[in-house]
Amino acid sequence: MSEDHYFTAQPASAAERRALTVRLAGRDVEVETAGGIFSPGRIDLGTSVLLRHVPDPPAAGDLLDLGCGWGPLALTMALEAPEARVWAVDVNERALDLVRSNAARLGLANVTAVRPDEVPDDVAFAACWSNPPIRVGKGVLHDLMRTWLPRLRADATAHLVVQRNLGADSLATWLTQDLGMHVDRRASAKGFRVLDVRA
């Protein structure tokens, strides 16, 4: 894995920030992105598919964006559920800095951008929206799912978007057979599956 890959803690590429206008929660907003993170030039196609098909987030409680990048999912949840606390979780420090500055720029005090080990153990999530980092490999991905999905509240759903040809169906099978989760396919679009995952 190159040291500049987006799922490393400290990307080696230049951190020069650039402005980007995107549509989140039905409005055009300006955010900052930078190299060395996932999809720095736009909202990637998978995240766009998820945003089109995911239901509104719960109005309150703790919400999780797992693998947040510069924050399109976390920022959307925070805009749509201002009374909720949104946890934007990533290993990439540059991505976390961008989420923090983007949340501040949009006046979103309800976003907490942290590394995985900084989320208190007693936090249980009312929902999870995630475009998980499939390219980290099956073992690491499965560890992520084993770590975070059991932290959903009993009434909560995780909404995951996974590219079909990168293993969406095999992940759904694994979640059902190995983790004992209930998995439904919410949507298929543009080569992606949106999966609803519940305990």
Image: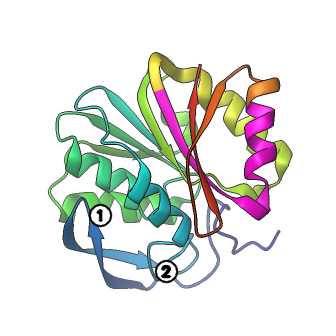
Q: Which three-letter amino acid code belongs to the residue tagged 2?
A: Ala
Residue 3 location in percent, x, y? 75, 72
Say few, some or many: other residues with alpha carbon within 10 Å of mark 2 (under 14 / 14 to 19 / 20 or more): few
Residue 192 location in percent, x, y? 62, 61
Left or right: residue 39 compared with residue 56:
right
- Up-down: is 96 above or below 120? below
Residue 166 location in percent, x, y? 78, 61
Examine the image and state in which quarter residue 139 appears.
top right
Does residue 5 show up? yes
Q: Circle 1 sits on which residue? A: 101
Q: Residue 172: within the magenta? A: yes
Say few, some or many: other residues with alpha carbon within 10 Å of mark 1 (under 14 / 14 to 19 / 20 or more): some
Instruction: Write the start and end of the magenta stretch as one range.
Output: 157-175
Q: For the residue labelled by badge 1, is the local secondary structure a helix, a strand or a loop?
A: helix
Q: Residue at x 64, y 32 (%)?
A: 183
Residue furthest left in the image = 107
Residue 56 location in percent, x, y? 30, 42
In contact (CB < 8 Å): disc 2 and disc 1: no
Q: Residue at x 42, y 53 (%)?
A: 53
Q: Residue at x 77, y 56 (%)?
A: 136
- Up-down: is 96 above or below 86? below
Nearer to us in this view, 15 or 191: 191
Q: Which mark is residue 15?
A: 2
Q: Quadrant of the N terminus?
A: bottom right
Does residue 178 show up? no
Q: Which three-letter amino acid code belongs to the residue tagged 1?
A: Ser
Q: Residue 38: within the magenta? A: no
C-alpha gap between disc 2 and disc 1: 14 Å
Q: Which mark is residue 35?
A: none
- Up-down: is 10 above or below 22? above
Q: Earlier in the sequence, mark 2 or mark 1?
A: 2
